Image (tube, rainbow, N blue to C red):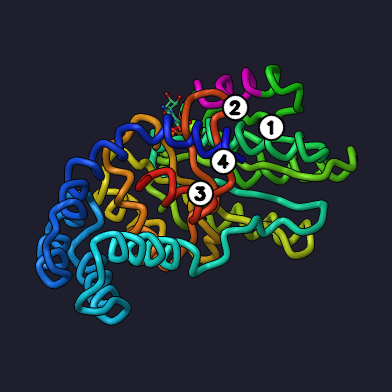
Amino acid sequence: MAAMTGNLREKLAGTRRTFRERLGGLFQSGKSRDLILEDLSEALILADLGASSSGRIIQALREKTGKNDSAAEIQNALREELIRILGRCPVESAVRSTPAVIMMVGVNGGGKTTSLAKLALHFQTEGKSVMMVAADTFRAAAQEQLAIWGKKLNAPVVRGQYGADPAAVVFDALQSFRSHGRDLLLVDTAGRIHTNANLMSELEKVKRIIAREIPAAPQEILLVLDSTIGQNALVQAGEFLKFSGITGIFLTKLDGSAKGGSIISIVEELGLPVKYIGIGEDAGDMLPFSPRDFVLALTS
Ligand SMILES: Nc1nc2c(ncn2[C@@H]2O[C@H](COP(=O)(O)OP(=O)(O)OP(=O)(O)O)[C@@H](O)[C@H]2O)c(=O)[nH]1
Ligand SMILES: [Mg+2]
């Protein structure tokens, strides 16, 4: 546990620096609560928490702390408030029984394929047998990229032809998945498509086929968002919010991000839980999200 927090701290170095630069001085200033809260509002915005989330946090702290509370007490109340926001929606995996299907969606380059491989290893470690399908038929290299992960993880990968209908590729994968009696099918999708057809309707079609073939599937649809772009992740999420049934967020590249504070407004504005975080390029570089571990690693 201690090792995990230490490792997470190290991985969050960029965002920790941002927090230290923006917030560090405030709690050592010896100022009164009201003056601290005044400065904290701007500091939170500069730490990428966004104006509306920052405003709400200040309001909550005004209600939860007393006028004469010490800086340490206010800092503690801030930590608890951040933990509360991040834990408001359940962060646990939606996969409670097998067979199950997990689908990854998100703009190109966000980290879908890499994150899918990370989940494959994660569930293998839990003793589940996984299968992956490359329903990204837009980029020729996408199929190869997933095939390489499949070899590394010793997990079967169903590939489609470049330009094939993703729903047809997924249909084939579902037959193979069932006939082999595997536990978990992980579906990689494209961030862009070649036709003029709307990406969202294509994703809907993939989802419908999955639902038709496996009861209650897909159990999890993860929106993959890049944490290095801060508040712009909300813009990146935009189009995908029209796609129904997203169950959570896989927030990537926190190891290389100075803007991890944006996680607060991502969770608040989208009303979706962060379920997993990416902290490197290897299959083992991810963690199931824990609001408390995350906030403590960031702020202490
Ligand atoms: N440092 C770091 N790099 C990451 C992380 N996740 C993904 N990447 C890198 O981000 C780049 C893009 O990742 P992909 O998984 O190919 O992204 P994608 O969303 O599948 O991209 P498209 O298939 O083009 O839509 C790769 O170089 C990954 O190694 C992470 O958590 N940390
Ligand atoms: Mg990809």
Please state which of residues 8 and 267 is positioned toward the viewer in this rendering.
8
The kind of residue tagged 2 is Ala
What residue sits 55% from the left and 23% below the top? 282
Left or right: 251 in relation to 52: right
> Looking at numbered disc 3 in the image, what kind of residue is underneath it?
Asp
Earlier sequence position, callout 3 versus callout 2? 2
Question: Label 4 belongs to which residue?
Answer: 287
Instruction: Name the spot of residue 241 as percent of width and height, x first.
Output: 40, 62
Residue 208 image point, x, y percent = 64, 60
- Farthest residue, direction bottom: 63
Residue assigned mark 3: 293
Q: Which residue was labeled with disc 1? A: 121
Say left or right for 65 vs 37: right
What residue is drawn where x is 12% and y is 59%?
Answer: 42
Provide the residue designation for mark 2. 283
Proximity of marks 2 and 1: CB atoms separated by less than 8 Å: yes
Residue 138 can be seen, yes or no: no
Which quadrant does the N terminus fall into? top right
147 in magenta: yes
Among numbered discs 1 and 4, the one appearing first in the sequence: 1
The reply to whether callout 3 and callout 4 are in contact (CB within 8 Å) is yes
Cα–Cα gap, marks 3 and 2: 21 Å
Disc 3 and disc 2 in contact, CB within 8 angstroms: no
Q: Which residues are magenta?
A: 141-149
Instruction: Give the alpha-carbon distance from disc 3 to disc 4, as whole Å.
Output: 11 Å
SS label for mark 1: helix
Q: Is residue 197 above or below residue 169?
A: below
Task: Pick whichever, 126 or 143, lies toward us.
Answer: 126
Label 4 SS: strand
